Amino acid sequence: MPEPPASWHQPDLAAKFLQNVRGAIPLSIEQIDMMLRLLTAARGERLENFLDLGCGDGVLSSAILDENPGARGCLVDYSEAALATAREQLGAHANSVEFVLTDYAQPGWMSEIARTQPFDAVVSGFAAQHSPDDRKRALFGEIFQLLKPDGIFINIEHVASATRWTESIWDDYMIDAIFGQELRASADRSRAEIAREYYARAVQEADALAPLEVQCDWLREIGFENVDCYLKVLELAVFGGQRPA
């Protein structure tokens, strides 16, 4: 997925990024449906609280709270602009959510949410995919510590392709999705212009993506059980695991 722009903290640019990225993500509805099914399977009606790590516009939290009206959400992001968008989107759930501004890419971020942990679930959508491998693995370990026994971690992430062939299919998929979205918005950019921008960004991001299998192995080594990829289309994966009872 596209990396947030350098001026991500400006509200108008943050809102545009969130809208464009969410609209271009393939199988968005299926991702959220799978997340809700996994939460129900893991916690049933016992979902009391959850952490939305890198909450962005709050779309994951909104779905969880609609499905579990008695739950409470802790929404964490490093961008005040993103949190402002989430606050607006979650106005109907204002009494059930708390917003925390902190940089989870830095060790020690958990102190900012100490009074709200542990959690029945931790969900994350495209929040840590640009972190270096060692930091991402450490973050998975921190998430494990934040979970209650039987708590579940569900991560929606852009992962590295296994081969250059599948990577090329993904690239075409995303360029077509972005182009189609811009056509619907009456934008005047050509597909070739979008492709040039896409590939320029992809070159910058390529080294940061980790293979799915490697990340699942990290989760198992940390102590998660029931680790699996629950949904995948090319470079987009929904994966995670549970903390043992």
Image (cartoon, rainbow, N blue to C red):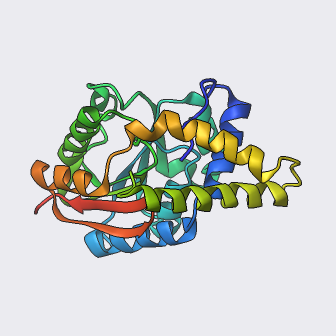
Q: Residue at x 18, y 44 (%)?
A: 145
Quadrant housing residue 224? bottom left
Number of callouts: 0
- Position of residue 229 measured from the top left corner of the image (x, y, whole percent): 31, 66
Residue extending farthest to the front is: 165
Q: Image height check: is 126 above or below 243? A: above
In the image, 130 versus 13, the foreground residue is 130
- Tell me the quadrant of the picture where the C terminus can be found: bottom left
- Position of residue 2 measured from the top left corner of the image (x, y, whole percent): 57, 42
222 lies left or right of 100: left
- Position of residue 158 measured from the top left corner of the image (x, y, whole percent): 44, 52
Asked whether the viewer can see residue 151, the reply is no
Asked whether the viewer can see residue 14, the reply is yes
- Position of residue 196 measured from the top left corner of the image (x, y, whole percent): 68, 41
Q: Image height check: is 245 above or below 159? A: below
In the image, 224 versus 99, the foreground residue is 224
Q: Image height check: is 122 above or below 176? A: above
Q: Image height check: is 125 above or below 47? A: above
55 lies left or right of 82: left
Quadrant housing residue 115? top left
59 lies left or right of 136: right
